[in-house]
Amino acid sequence: MNDLESSPLRPHRLSATAISLGLLAVIAVGAVLKVAQGVVLPLLIAWLLSYLLAPAVNFLVRRLRFPAPLAVGCVVALLLLASWGVGLVIQQRLMAFAKAFPAYEAKIAALYAHFGQELDIPANVLSEANWTAQIGPLVLKTSRFFMTFISNAILVMIFLVFMLLAKPYANDKLRAALPDRADTIIGVSNAISAQIGVYLGSLFVISLVTGLLVWGALAWLGIEFAFTWGLLAFVLNFIPTVGSIVASLPPIAMALVQHYPSIWPVVGVALVLFAIQMTLGNIIAPKVFGDRLNLSPVVVLLFLVFWGWLWGITGALLAVPLAAAIQIALAHIPALAPLAVLMGSGKRYSKKPPS
């Protein structure tokens, strides 16, 4: 049973003053988060990772009797090794694409000339756009973003180590310090951990399958850099809705450049990618998630826009876990419980059709 169903929600009337103060508080917090991004973002990532890795640490400490520092060291070392491997693969693929890009410039120039004549676009407009000169630096900037993200992982790991060291004994300390409220706090924490764990675990599997299918389909269709586009689909699939659309554009553009002037390979690539994204995103994913991720699509979109504006790609990746955590926390605060209901999908409150 979902945690929001088990907690009674009593309606509370919110005054205009309270709503205004709440909006001002949100704006103030947003400004602080924007300014303190360098510290707050690694801390937030470490907090989310601690929910995912805490079960492994607790298992090693309580079941296998590992010392807490050794258990944390083993888990963090495995995470670092996996992150290093993924970052190295992404870096190599981006650099390979950047080196191979000059070979496509003549074809792209021919495409400019063709569509410029067909659409009657003035030549100076295309020359001022000069997209071919921007793609190479854009790839390099993206590569540097991943390397910067990996370098910031040092600060994330420092926060994560201290959080994980405290995890095995956190509940015991809460019960000793706050005997009256400890169970409620532990319940909220466990609900957040379960919600985030189920969402990220399911999303990882779906993204991995998406990436493999895109890679295999593009390789079968003879599209160059098929593995790179499959890797891009895997990474961007973690961003709801927008990520799958953005991931489909580069391979379609590559098919256009590679097979110009023939248009049918481009149509075939677009149809295959559309079929993969529609099947996994609109058929498989809802069945996997079910009602466990009880968030309105509008809320997901708003969080995606807000956190993406605030922290860029990293903020967009964190948008849904943050929305789920905030919703669960609001559900356990009586005065704010109606907001948790409004953030939900609303399926459980709809009237059942008469039999």
Image (spheres, rainbow, N blue to C red):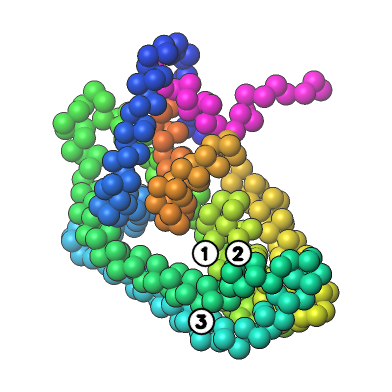
Of 67 and 333, which appears nearest the observer? Answer: 333
Q: Is tag 2's residue or tag 3's residue first in the polypeptide sequence?
A: 3
* Residue stretch in magenta: 332-355
Mark 1 packing: few (<14 Cα in 10 Å), some, or many (20+)?
many
Which-is-in-front pick, marks 1 and 3? 3
Q: Kindly check if marks 2 and 3 are in contact, taking CB atoms under 8 A apart as contact.
A: no
| Left or right: 214, with 259 as reference point | left
Q: Is tag 2's residue or tag 1's residue first in the polypeptide sequence?
A: 1
Q: Kindly check if marks 2 and 1 are in contact, taking CB atoms under 8 A apart as contact.
A: yes
Which-is-in-front pick, marks 2 and 1? 2
**Type of amino acid at the residue the image marks with label 3:** Ala
Q: Is residue 328 magenta?
A: no
Residue 60 found in image quarter: bottom left
Residue at (81%, 69%) from the top-left corner?
118
Which corner quadrant holds the C terminus? top right
The residue wearing badge 2 is 247
317 to 215, vertically: above or below = above
- Checking the image for residue 98, the label placed there is 3
The residue wearing badge 1 is 235
Which secondary structure lies at badge 2? helix
